[in-house]
Image (tube, rainbow, N blue to C red):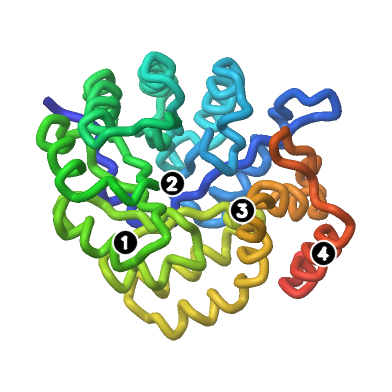
Amino acid sequence: MSFDDLTEQLASVVAITVTPFDADGAVDEKSYAAIVDRMVDGGVSVVTPNGNTSEFYTLSAAETERALRVTVDTVGDRAAIVAGVGHDLDSATRAARFADRAGARGVMVHQPVHPYVSLDGWVDYHRAIAEAVPELSVVLYVRNPRIGGAQIAALADACPNVVGVKYAVPDPVRFASVARDAGLDRFTWVAGLAELSAPGYFAVGATGFTSGLATVAPQLPVQMFKALQVHEFGAAMEFWEFIRRFEELRAADESAGNVSVVKEALAQLGLCRRDVRPPASVLDEAGRSAVGVLLNSWSLL
């Protein structure tokens, strides 16, 4: 069995797209393409459409497919595309097969949304998706602290196209243990909680990190990654401090503004509307002002 191995490419900034909407609430494909193009021009080498910052759980299957098509058309061969897939098993496998046909290099499997997740069931869910697209690389999205190295290793034993883990449990000690139990060098470990967690996770084994900030100011996460890549943690923390307030705004109130802050910044830059779909909501005037202050401090306005 052969597949398009993304191991090396994932050791980078893994940018998560936003999904702009027009005045009628439909996906604004023109704005979407312009934002993605701007990210890649800014140095981003892995683009993930249909991630959480893309408002994945509010998008229809047709909308996720169209977003992926626009991403592929816009990016071409300038960056690797890893498409988010998820929901029920049938929907996830259908989306994975579509990603293969559309030209993605891999898929990132969202955490299963189910009130009762067993460890064996978690393995079975991901195994079915990975086996449906044996020629694509598969990245696991782990947000459940119960998932350990044994489950990840067992899955990769069955499916060699499982090559990366986006680890988003807010516990670097747990991450260090899971990565070593699964195989630190067997997978590319991506810090899945964006810039604020990246230095701590890089210190114990991560080699890439996710970013929503990359849609707004791609040069900032790219520069931070370059420092982390060579373990220049002092330099990385200078970038950390520079973008800290923006990421804190996104993380406030249990990340209620995760997408809204990013879209507000893009709206102020004239790149798309600020609209988000429920259960998210646009920022209030105080939030908008806070985003504007940050953009001014970054000399973007």
| Residue at disc 4, secondary structure | helix
Q: Disc 3 or disc 2, which is closer to the eye?
A: 3
Q: CA distance from mark 4 to mark 1?
A: 32 Å
Q: Amino acid at mark 4?
A: Gly
Mark closest to the chain's N terminus, 2 or 4: 2
Q: Is residue 152 left or right of residue 220?
A: left
Quadrant of the image occupied by residue 231: bottom left
Q: Residue under label 2, please give it.
A: 46
| Residue occupying the far front of the picture | 116
Res. 135 visible in picture:
no
Q: CA distance from mark 1 to mark 3?
A: 24 Å
Q: Amino acid at mark 2?
A: Val
Mark closest to the chain's N terminus, 3 or 4: 3
Mark closest to the chain's N terminus, 4 or 1: 1
| Residue occupying the far bottom of the picture | 234
Q: Residue at the spot x=82%, y=64% of the render? A: 292
Q: Residue under label 3, please give it.
A: 255
| Residue at disc 1, secondary structure | loop
